[in-house]
Image: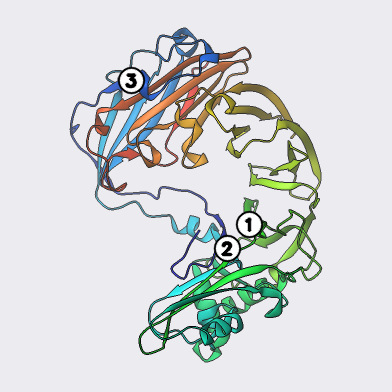
Amino acid sequence: MKKSLALFCALLAAALVGSGAAAIRTAKTAQQVETRPVPLAETELSEQSGLQWSPRAGRDAAADLQLQFQAQCEQRLRWDFTLNPAAEPEHPETKFYKLNRLPQEDAHMRNQSLELYACMGFGTSVSGGTIALSDEAQTFGFGPAFEEVAENTPAGQEHSQVLDLSLYMKEWPMTVGFAAAGQWLPYEQFWEMRVHPENRSAENEALYQMVEHLVQSFRFPIKGHPMMEFTVQKDESGAVVTLNAVQSGEENPTIDCYEALLNGGHYLILEAREGDGSLMDYSHTPGGYGIYRLPVYGEDDTPAPEDLQFFYELNPEEKLRLFTSDERNLLLVTEKEGQVFLKVLDETGSEIENMALGALSQNNWVQIQKDLVLLLRHGPNAEQHSFTLLRRTQENTYQREMDGVLPGGTCFENVAMPNDAAMAFDGSRFALAAPYGREYRGDCGYSVLVYDAQGLLFGDARQTSLSQGPGGNYQSQCHVVPGSMALRFADPA
């Protein structure tokens, strides 16, 4: 992720998603909405499936399936869709609304949210105006290295040097941006307040102290001799106008941040590793490598340093791939020796599950819907996209219900956001749906798959007539409303 000052950061962001109550009025349907099958050229199944990509392929297996979703255009016009994907849905049931005002996030949801940007000094880029190298608020801790390069940079020119970072600092520069309880302190402002305390106010002092505590809590010594390329550009008068620092080694250190929300707490993981994959030195952290907890702040709460608590120790030999939560537990997807594992912790930190899920893939994400947990694994080609479906039992254990292969050419290879998908399971059949289309979140189309234990039963991909306009700005074109998709099998008669 890049911010305006382009520290190379790991983004940890979690916010409860809610489409706030919007004042609406019912209007006459603006147009007759239709759907059309997506041409085979756009949605080819892998040859291994042996099925036609058609609503008639196994349609009896999806005859009692109902799909609902919302489409929106210009942030003002909205359609509610209800249809059976297997019943030739050329004319789905729709309801049209006009939003009198833009949907806004509910205040309670906003107070439940937490954003934490953890930025380690693996690189930076600063430009615009004259830069004072002595001001850490502008150099983010790299001042001494930039000063050496600047001495060798003539006016009106750009000059680069590869330097041993360990000669200039003992710890990786670290900063965070923090948002909670409606309060927001971006990392650029934190550095400004840190270097220039006279710019702090009584209103933001407590928030600054909280962020400073987080920075001091996660300090990582520099190991070995990491090399970085520093670049300085000067204008004709000799003033520094651009700074850039990037890692130059073949094996560079990394930092990844994860967050999950569960029962009034934000659970945080900061995973920092050396270029060889080994864990960085966590001896300067409050509890070592593991899960930390912060409370969910209310509107009148003041974040305090003592709020940060160590919750659970993690195994440094296991590489963390995913961290999330369902309604009752924390879920971690880890990788060790090429295999993927699901570890489940309850709110006390007790391990209640540690399940092997198979070989590691290039990309993995988890979709959670009530008691269903879906792990999607993306391989290097379409034939290696697969899934595992788990179900949480009443005893709070996780039962492996189904494994399958995702057909190529479907939107499930690159779903923009996990929460965009929907799923349903009736004990023997599993249905999965997600937006389908040309761009982010799929215009106004959808794709549906239905499986049983033997494999794929039914598949269909369609675009609605709302998608016929040209592509362009995401907000101005029609698109599926994030998180609006829902699937259900009809209750047995």
Judged from the image, the secondary structure of the residue bearing numbered disc 1 is: strand
x, y percentage for residue 486? 46, 31
The answer to whether 173 appears left or right of 462 in the picture is right
Residue at the spot of label 1:
257
Q: Tell which residue pokes out farthest to the bottom in this image.
A: 198
Residue at the spot x=35%, y=86% of the render? 236
x, y percentage for residue 239? 41, 87
Judged from the image, the secondary structure of the residue bearing numbered disc 2 is: strand
Residue at the spot of label 2:
116
Residue at the spot x=79%, y=52% of the render? 314
Structural distance between the alpha carbons of marks 3 and 1: 40 Å
Q: Amino acid at mark 1?
A: Cys
Q: Amino acid at mark 2?
A: Leu
Residue at the spot of label 3:
39
* Mark toward the viewer: 2 or 1: 1
Residue density around tag 3, few if under 14, some if 14–19, many if 20 or more, within 10 Å: few
